[in-house]
Amino acid sequence: LPRDAARLVLARNHPHHVTINAIGTRNEKLNRYLEVSEEVRSAVARKAPVVALETAILTHGLPSPDNVELAIEVEAVIRANGAVPATIGIVNGLARVGLSRSMIEALGSGSGSTMKVSRRDLPYITGLGLHSGGTTVAGTMVLAHLAGIKIFSTGGIGGVHRAAANSMDISADLMELSRTNVAVVCSGPKPFLDIERTVEYLETAGVPVMTFGSLKAEKTWLPVFYSRDSLVPSPLVVETAAEAAGIIFTSHMLGLQNGQLFCNPIPEENDIPRLAMHAIITAAVKRATKREITGKNVTPFILEHIRRTTKGASVEANKALVLNNAKRATKMAVELSKLES
Ligand code: PSU
Ligand code: MN
């Protein structure tokens, strides 16, 4: 069956369709596995503002129909603020940058066979051409970089899990940030992680971790997804989208190969205070351990448990922060486009 599937993929080739990758070369063979939409390719070539978006949140992070509604709304917010959205995912075995609305709907209503796709899964899923999949932060960074996109907006990133000393469960998102030069705009690491160790890991990996705030404030906490506070100080602070764009621009000018993490606290009106989340998160983590949930299933399991115990409030907060991050990322992309042209 896999061999037939591979043939199917080859039959679906579009040899006339040429991808311009991050180093500006045309690569026709790459194009059999990676398809960048016309709109995104043209925007990247003109150095117009583009914001990449992930799809693991669509396939494994939010319940239906909130997931599809949000994915469509995020794209609208990005367009309204002056950039081209590039939603990234795997549809029928092809890695795609710039999904159509119908592809987003198909991914979001997918059956249980829809994969959660990180870097390690990319050659498997595209090589066999069997599945559809939602790309995680790590998987999306790889594809965004191949398409020449420098800014990517999401909800929250993965990190060092609380039991990592034994489980060795550290999200591939962190490793990816250490080796792919894409700026990730998020609301911080997810709160059920070990936040201190996540920050330590990123420091070792050479990844700047910056939070939007005021340089005059005595302290700026690293936000943790639903909550603005974490009791963990942000290593660095930025004030404006223009500053952030300058940092991204410099990172590329210096030829650095790692990414940057920009943390954008959830809007105050949507904040779920850290203390209100504390017991819920502890219970969710305990339950995942008891049920022996491991590997890529941990994060979706915990998110779903939090959704149920907060009676959906976590989903509302999740939606609000994703939209807010998209707005911020778009402003950064607009500023970066000015610096590049
Ligand atoms: N944030 C959300 N929902 C999600 C995720 C993040 O609000 O579903 C996804 C992201 O795609 C992230 C992934 O990359 O969870 C991390 O999974 P893991 O811990 O297995 O690396
Ligand atoms: Mn993991």
Image: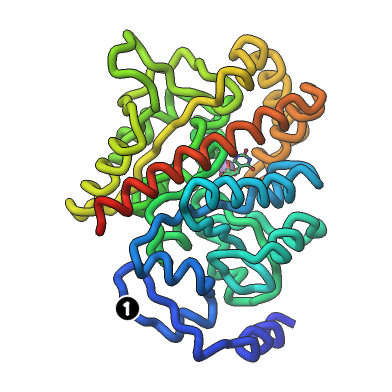
The location of residue 29, given as percent across then percent down, is: 45, 85
| Residue closer to the observer: 211 or 113 | 211
Q: Residue at x 29, y 18 (%)?
A: 215
Relative to 60, say whether 168 is above or below. Answer: above
Q: Residue at x 68, y 26 (%)?
A: 285
Relative to 218, say whether 307 is above or below. Answer: below
| Snapshot quadrant of residue 299 | top right
Q: Residue at x 59, y 38 (%)?
A: 323
- Which amino acid does the dot numbered 1 rest on? Thr
The location of residue 182, given as percent across then percent down, is: 38, 51
| Residue closer to the observer: 69 or 108 | 69
From the viewer's perspective, tell me whether residue 250 is left or right of residue 191. left
The location of residue 112, given as percent across then percent down, is: 80, 56
Q: Which residue is mark 1?
A: 25
Q: Residue at x 56, y 60 (%)?
A: 88
Quadrant occupied by the N terminus = bottom right
